[in-house]
Image (spheres, rainbow, N blue to C red):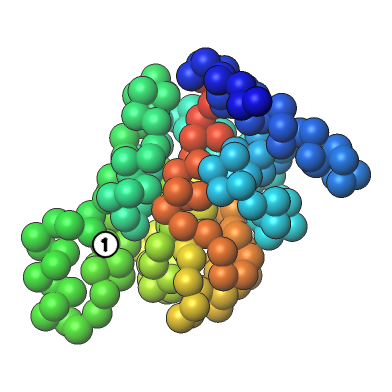
Amino acid sequence: MIEIVKPMDIEKRSFEIIGSILSERGITLDEEKAPIIKRVIHTTADFEYVENLVFSENAVQIGLDALRSGCCIVTDTQMAKSGINKTALAKLGGEAFCFMSDEDVALEAKERGVTRAIVSMEKAARLEKPIIFAIGNAPTALIALDELIKAGKLAPKLIIGVPVGFVNVVESKELIIASGVPHIVARGRKGGSNVAAAIVNALMYKLTR
């Protein structure tokens, strides 16, 4: 028999199942990181994220402090931006941006022969508020961020680096891990815009729920 679960109970039941499976596998998560890891598992149904997600020292607390201060969230896809809970973000005084579809970004990228992701990150670096970057698709966005940081043009509060794919994905994530900037990175090829949004939401829910 299939039990019909009320909509408001589905998420709660899902997290109970995730907790049960982790327990069955003898996995105990760090208390601070657990809500982020579990939400990513909830989003993907992939328990490999227990091992794949890499947190720099105090990354969760640094992210929470940035969100409390009303920081911007910059994504590399409209999908990631759409997946971020705008109600929770508004409560914290923050705003989400994605510059990938901006006309000026498209024009400059074409003129320079580079990806829109690169130009988007350069545009984001000109924002005057603290920034958390949530990158779920474009490894070139992470490469651009690393270059901007090294050039002293950008000091992100936190980089969520979870692009998915095969070309420069693994390498770009390792750049961020080695950068010294606070980060939450999905090591390897796995990730996606949904994962980037899930991590942002998990951080916000620690403050708003």
Residue 110 visible, this angle: yes
- The part of the image, by quadrant, that contains residue 71 is top left
At 61% from the left edge and 47% from the top edge, which residue is drawn? 45
Q: Quadrant of the C terminus?
A: top right
128 shown above or below 159: above
Q: Position of residue 91 (x, y in %)?
A: 39, 20
Q: Position of residue 51 (x, y in %)?
A: 74, 57
- The disc labelled 1 sits on which kind of residue? Ser
Residue lying at the far bottom in this picture: please name it: 113
Q: Secondary structure at mark 1?
A: helix
Q: Position of residue 206 (x, y in %)?
A: 59, 26
- The part of the image, by quadrant, that contains residue 43 is top right
Q: Nearer the viewer, residue 145 or 200?
A: 200
58 shown above or below 92: below
At 59% from the left edge and 53% from the top edge, which residue is drawn? 184
At 58% from the left edge and 54% from the top edge, which residue is drawn? 183
Q: Position of residue 58 (x, y in %)?
A: 69, 44
Question: Mark 1 = which residue?
Answer: 120
Residue 155 visible, this angle: no
Q: Could you tell whether 31 is left or right of 77 in the image?
A: right
The local crowd at label 1, few if under 14, some if 14 to 19, many if 20 or more residues have their Cα within 10 Å, is many
Q: Could you tell whether 60 is left or right of 167 in the image?
A: right
Report the label total: 1
Q: Quadrant of the N terminus?
A: top right
Residue lying at the far front in this picture: please name it: 1
At 80% from the left edge and 33% from the top edge, which residue is drawn? 20
